[in-house]
Image (cartoon, rainbow, N blue to C red):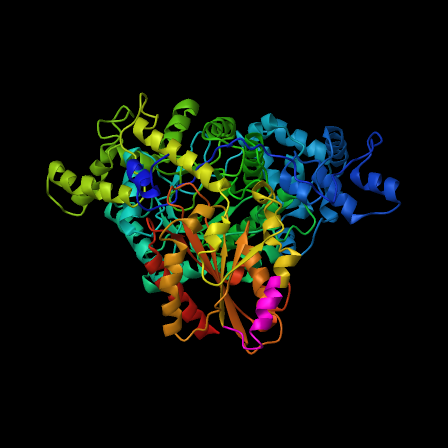
């Protein structure tokens, strides 16, 4: 890119506003996390000795810490378990841990919980523990591997989440695949989740919530005969009006084609917002989404409680019920590891959803179909603090697929990775081929591997086509019939000349609305629309390569170039010369030793150095008890270029200040600028500045931070957190659950002036609530 400005670079790709996620190793190799807690080294067990007998022989009595460590050590290695002090020191210790678990009776494992809270109680209450067979975990493994599906399904209701989590760690990848190939939980009235079927969630994300971007990605997916599970977009804005507008736009497509009983729509905002959107426009929301965690405290991070989810479950009586997302590592990276391993955390999320599923089943009237309930395991989205390699991604997906199936759930996968993992574009293709024999219910589907809003790497339309070709998987019969009716697939089940032509789908959409114009007339309208969408940074796939399942070569090249730009962005450091250009800047740093330490050990970017704390105390003292209401903070995050590019942060601040002043907010004149800073570092700054005695009962931070790179647009976000003095005074009390965010900001995506207006509106609403 030498000699090219960023705008010229984007123009050369046909982009001008988005966030696509890319990934490559850039010469950096993953290194094991240095863990002061140490790793788990076990002595050789006696023959037939179980975990409880071993602990008593080693310590003289039961010890919960050692119990958790032995169970954790039986897992395949992942960095997340290592950070928690639960990973085996070597393969020999891992084998010993597995031997101990295999020798332990199911009832003993069931009776001795690794952690108890209200969620574990709900899971226990909705598990038929009284029907638990008299067998060891090793015998259960043999049973599951050797018995047919019908026999396994008779036993499944008696298996708690913790037992299922213990079971999968005894299995090899090949054994997990074998279980995945014979246990299926299809959605009622469809083939989704059935043996030999592999569906798709169309993920039509837009970096600006542009309805046209979102609608055309649906047309794009359907032009490749992809997309039969849900039209599910991740919103930038969580404002009810915006979410409602997108819900209506997606539902309108479904309604126009008469697919109301075939596929739902969904905007993946917080479930509270979806419920509010349903009140604004009754009947337009489809299946309701919510991220779930494995403990009560971790769910609180998502502003979710058991009672809240049970209340919403009571409202789900139609065809479409609940759609959950989970992922190994989400709990402990949000500060709620609770001393037990990531696989058990993940299993308890499935147990939570199973409990909600049973509640909905009980309230469904006899003779009525059961509402659709399914879960998407987003494996690989967090980063190297959870795991780093392609082999670990495969293992995680296989574990979660089997755990979901043994919970009686329809489970799909987001086989994905982040820029700072050691997983390349080619590696991701390899992972897909290793995982798909386990026959998960569905995958994500986008025009390319790069999500234009979330900045991560996932599965494209062409990945679906290749998987279906290689593994002979089909999609839901009703949608296949629709694709034939649409003219995308012929009567011999082969692609037609319209395959890969989103304008053709748009033409059929307009005809369904009663538009009698010719295809040529509609094409004159559609092609400029596609061009405008691409210029906003949302890719549109058209045509294909040598095979119908190969990506179009020029589009593949764009992805590769964006990929390379993302690597440069990730490792670029915030320069001292830039910091000096910010009026009132106070240079600060986290405990990350350098950029590499920050990327591979993200927790170091959440802690402040003693020198930084001293600077914050000096800033607080300078206020002399007359604290401002708001404090701006700037951090590089994962993309310092997003902060330093012309027309970005300096322009944003220039627009924001008068907006806040006009609304009567007082803003600190000084701006802490953090090198290697994460979002939670901002909360620590807030604690230092607003947690002491002062003149305000409510105060807030506006944390400007570089987003994950990958789009070429170098977007940044603003995290808006307003809390009481009492909450700021409690270490760790202020967290993501009360934070609002405006994302996708750059001079080529969400313009800084518009972003400043959005931040101003949120600050105003929070002041009113306060």
Displayed quadrant of residue 491 = top left
- Answer above or below: position of 447 versus 767: above
- Percent position of residue 657, x then y: 39, 67
**Is 270 in front, or is 683?**
683
Q: Say whether residue 208 is left or right of residue 508.
A: right
Residue range (magenta): 615-628
The location of residue 212, given as percent across then percent down, is 26, 48
742 horizontally vs 722: left or right: left
Q: In this orientation, does residue 239 appear?
A: no
Residue 221 visible: yes
| Residue name at image x 37 percent, y 52 percent | 286
Please tell me whether residue 198 belongs to the stretch shown in magenta. no
**Looking at the image, residue 338 lies above or below residue 88:** below
Q: Position of residue 176 (x, y in %)?
A: 59, 30
Q: Position of residue 199 (x, y in %)?
A: 40, 36
* Quadrant where the image shows the N terminus: top left
Number of dots carrying numbers: 0
* Quarter location, residue 617: bottom right
Question: Which residue is depicted at the point 49% across and 41% down?
Answer: 570
In the image: residue 524, left or right of residue 39: left
Viewer-proximal residue among 265 and 715: 715
Name which residue lies at 64% across and 66% down.
730
Q: Is 280 situated left or right of 572 in this image?
A: left
């Amino acid at each position: 890119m030498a000699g090219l400005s960023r705008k010229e670079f984007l123009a050369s790709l046909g982009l001008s506003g988005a966030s696509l996620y890319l990934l490559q190793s850039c010469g950096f190799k993953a290194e094991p996390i240095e863990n002061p807690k140490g790793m788990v080294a076990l002595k050789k067990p006696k023959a037939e000795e179980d975990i409880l007998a071993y602990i008593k022989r080693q310590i003289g009595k039961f010890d919960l810490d050692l119990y958790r460590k032995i169970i954790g050590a039986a897992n395949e290695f992942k960095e997340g378990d290592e950070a928690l002090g639960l990973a085996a020191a070597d393969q020999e210790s891992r084998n010993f841990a597995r031997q101990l678990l295999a020798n332990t009776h199911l009832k003993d494992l069931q009776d001795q919980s690794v952690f108890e809270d209200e969620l574990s109680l709900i899971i226990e209450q909705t598990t038929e523990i009284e029907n638990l067979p008299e067998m060891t975990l090793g015998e259960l493994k043999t049973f599951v591997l050797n018995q047919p599906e019908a026999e396994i399904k008779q036993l499944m209701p008696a298996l708690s989440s913790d037992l299922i989590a213990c079971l999968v760690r005894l299995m090899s990848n090949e054994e997990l695949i074998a279980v995945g190939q014979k246990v299926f939980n299809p959605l009622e009235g469809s083939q989704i989740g059935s043996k030999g079927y592999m569906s798709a969630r169309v993920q039509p994300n837009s970096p600006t919530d542009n309805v046209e971007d979102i609608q055309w990605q649906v047309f794009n997916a359907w032009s490749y005969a992809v997309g039969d599970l849900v039209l599910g977009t991740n919103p930038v804005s969580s404002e009810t009006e915006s979410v409602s507008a997108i819900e209506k736009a997606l539902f309108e497509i479904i309604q126009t084609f008469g697919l109301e009983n075939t596929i739902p729509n969904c905007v993946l905002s917080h479930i509270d917002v979806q419920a509010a959107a349903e009140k604004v426009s009754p009947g337009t929301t489809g299946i309701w989404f919510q991220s779930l965690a494995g403990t009560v405290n971790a769910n609180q991070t998502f502003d979710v409680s058991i009672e809240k989810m049970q209340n919403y479950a009571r409202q789900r009586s139609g065809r479409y019920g609940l759609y959950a997302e989970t992922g190994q590592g989400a709990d402990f990276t949000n500060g709620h590891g609770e001393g037990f391993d990531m696989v058990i955390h993940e299993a308890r999320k499935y147990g939570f959803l199973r409990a909600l599923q049973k509640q909905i089943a009980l309230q469904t009237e006899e003779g009525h179909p059961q509402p659709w309930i399914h879960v998407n395991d987003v494996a690989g989205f967090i980063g190297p603090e959870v795991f780093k390699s392609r082999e670990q991604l495969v293992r995680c997906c296989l574990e979660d697929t089997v755990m979901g199936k043994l919970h009686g759930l329809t489970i799909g996968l987001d086989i994905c990775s982040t820029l700072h993992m050691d997983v390349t574009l080619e590696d991701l293709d390899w992972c897909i081929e290793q995982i798909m024999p386990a026959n998960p219910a569905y995958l994500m589907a986008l025009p390319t591997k790069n999500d234009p809003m979330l900045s991560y790497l996932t599965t494209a339309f062409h990945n679906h086509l290749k998987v279906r070709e290689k593994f002979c998987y089909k999609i839901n019969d009703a949608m296949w019939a629709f694709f034939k009716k649409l003219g995308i697939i012929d009567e011999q089940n082969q692609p037609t000349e319209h395959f890969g032509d989103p304008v053709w789908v748009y033409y059929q959409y307009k005809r369904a609305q009663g538009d009698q114009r010719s295809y040529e007339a509609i094409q004159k309208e559609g092609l400029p629309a596609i061009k405008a969408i691409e210029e906003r940074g949302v890719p549109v796939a058209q045509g294909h390569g040598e095979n119908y399942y190969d990506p179009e070569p020029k589009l593949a090249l764009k992805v590769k170039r964006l990929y390379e730009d993302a690597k440069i962005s990730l490792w670029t450091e915030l320069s001292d010369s830039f910091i000096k250009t910010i009026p009132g800047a106070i240079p600060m740093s986290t405990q990350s030793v350098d950029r590499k330490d920050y990327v591979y050990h993200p927790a170091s970017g959440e802690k402040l150095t003693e020198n930084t704390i001293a600077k914050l105390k000096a800033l607080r003292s300078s206020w002399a008890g007359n604290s401002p209401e708001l404090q701006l903070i700037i951090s590089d995050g994962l993309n310092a270029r997003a902060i330093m590019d012309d027309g970005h942060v300096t322009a944003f601040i220039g627009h924001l200040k008068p907006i806040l002043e006009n609304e009567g907010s007082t803003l600190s004149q000084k701006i802490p600028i953090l090198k290697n800073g994460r979002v939670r570092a901002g909360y620590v700054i807030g604690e230092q500045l607003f947690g002491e005695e002062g003149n305000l009962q409510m105060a807030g931070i506006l944390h400007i931070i570089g987003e994950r790179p990958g789009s070429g647009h170098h977007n940044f976000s603003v995290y808006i957190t307003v809390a009481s003095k009492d909450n700021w005074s409690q270490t760790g009390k202020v967290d993501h659950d009360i934070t609002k965010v405006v994302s996708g900001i750059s001079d080529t995506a969400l313009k800084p002036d518009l972003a400043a207006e959005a931040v101003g509106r949120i600050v105003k609403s929070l002041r009113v609530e306060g």
